[in-house]
Image: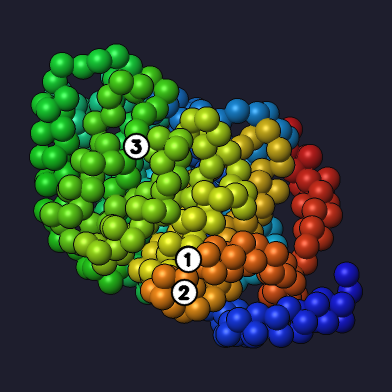
Amino acid sequence: MNKSEIIQAYESAKKRYAKLNVDTDSILEIMNNISISIHCWQGDDVGGFETPDSELSGGGLQVTGNYLGKARTISELRQDYEKVLSLLPGTHRVNLHAIYGEFGGKKVDRNEIGPSHFQGWIDWAKKNDVSIDFNPTLFSHPKADSGFTLSSKDKHIRDFWIKHVKKCRKIAEYIGKAQKDVCINNLWIPDGTKDIPIDRYGHRRILKESLEDIYSESLDSNAIKDSVEGKLFGIGSESFVVGSYDFYLAYASQHPDIMICLDMGHFHPTENVGEKIPSILQFQDSLLLHVSRGVRWDSDHVVILNDDLLSVAHEVIRADAVKRTYVALDFFDASINRLGAWVIGTRSTLKSFLIALLEPKEKLKKLEEDKKLFERLAYLEHMKQMPFGAVWDYYCLKKGVPVGVDYIDSVLQYEQDILGKRV
Ligand code: RNT
Ligand code: ZN
């Protein structure tokens, strides 16, 4: 499609939405404010840059695939990020794990890391007009091999990880101050067991105590916002996950400053994650999403525009909670071009929000209140055939990024010029 065709299609879509009282121009203004935190770990299969070279191990995270072009250094990762950002409409964020610091070829253990290891990222982010989010890394480390970190009965192990998370909070606060924009610091731990444990209570008691210790230090809330991420099961923690959803939901409800993180792969496959949002937002100021796609299990497939994703976006928009919801991606697929995976997942997430914003919310609410339920269903079905694609294409055009699948050529060119040479 050429430029005038895109504009023409938009003008006609705009008229159709206007008939439903939906103003597409003002929705595109809102789209500008939806920024997605793009996870660094899609670029190198959750490897990180510790010395000696770390390999993904422990924690039940598994990346499958062996596609060419994995980022081998921080500069390669940044180069990839820049390419990805150039293919996305809007302003987005960069989500770092603690193992992605610049350790200068030295062995810096997790309990010794500090802001200086992330200064390079801060400088780079500033140049690229993005903000950074952060995550402590409590996996891929010998002290996580027992399957327990913050909930370990071994005080030595536990203290090591408590110290790590405390250091990470300071780093996140430092980043937040430097970028003058809050840095989300999300905590996920791999703790759990393969088989049925006896002392679930004991481990959860210890985890609670560790968290109390960690979060007792109050930091600048304009610079750091903490969140905790629960999970249902992992590889090797099928029978028991210490940091379950119930655990963290209860914890967060007692700690108003701490957000709950909903990872879309961390629930029973038949559970509707979107449906949880209007409940949580009654009690919490804000919420973090890990947008992911589980296929039969928490497989972290590339996010696509499916019903699960739409449900999440719809519930955020219907609750009028764009400003209260932080959206981060969490998937890792090494079986296809890693940049392509990033671009597809981020674009699909943005599209889901656009579709949700284009819904005639007030009209549907009125039908519901008037008990016109057949009409409500008819409109919901009708919305599926409305030309949101024309609005999306126009948005991309306006933002100066590839329209439709035009980004394919750009990704393939990059593969030929850059990724293919990483051998
Ligand atoms: C693991 C969690 C967690 C990680 C990242 C790498 O199941 O989803 O968020 O994927 O921290
Ligand atoms: Zn996650």
According to the image, label 3 marks what residue?
231
- Count the marks: how many? 3
Q: How is the image coloured?
A: rainbow
Residue sitting at x 63%, y 67%: 383
Check the picture and name the quadrant holding the N terminus. Answer: bottom right
Report x, y in % for residue 15: 71, 85
Please tell me which residue lies in front, 70 or 265: 265
Of marks 3 and 2, which one's residue comes earlier in the chain?
Answer: 3
Q: Badge 3, how many Cα within 10 Å: few under 14, some, many 20+?
A: many
Mark identifier at residue 209: none
Q: Is residue 36 above or below residue 143?
A: below
The yes-or-no answer for disc 1 within 8 Å of ligand 2 is no
> Within 8 Å: ligand 1 and the Cβ of disc 3?
yes
Residue tagged 1:
373
Q: Which image quadrant is residue 119 in?
A: bottom left
Q: Are marks 2 and 1 in contact (CB under 8 Å)?
A: yes
Horizontal and vertical percent position of residue 362 = 46, 79
Residue 420 higher or lower than 409, as above or below: above
The reply to whether residue 140 is in sight is yes
Classify mark 2: residues with Cα within 10 Å, few (<14), some (14-19) or many (20+).
some
The kind of residue on which mark 3 rests is: Lys
Of marks 2 and 1, which one's residue comes earlier in the chain? 2
Mark 2 — residue?
Answer: 367
Query: Looking at the image, is mark 3 or mark 1 earlier in the sequence?
Result: 3
Secondary structure at badge 1 equals helix
Which residue type carries mark 1?
Leu
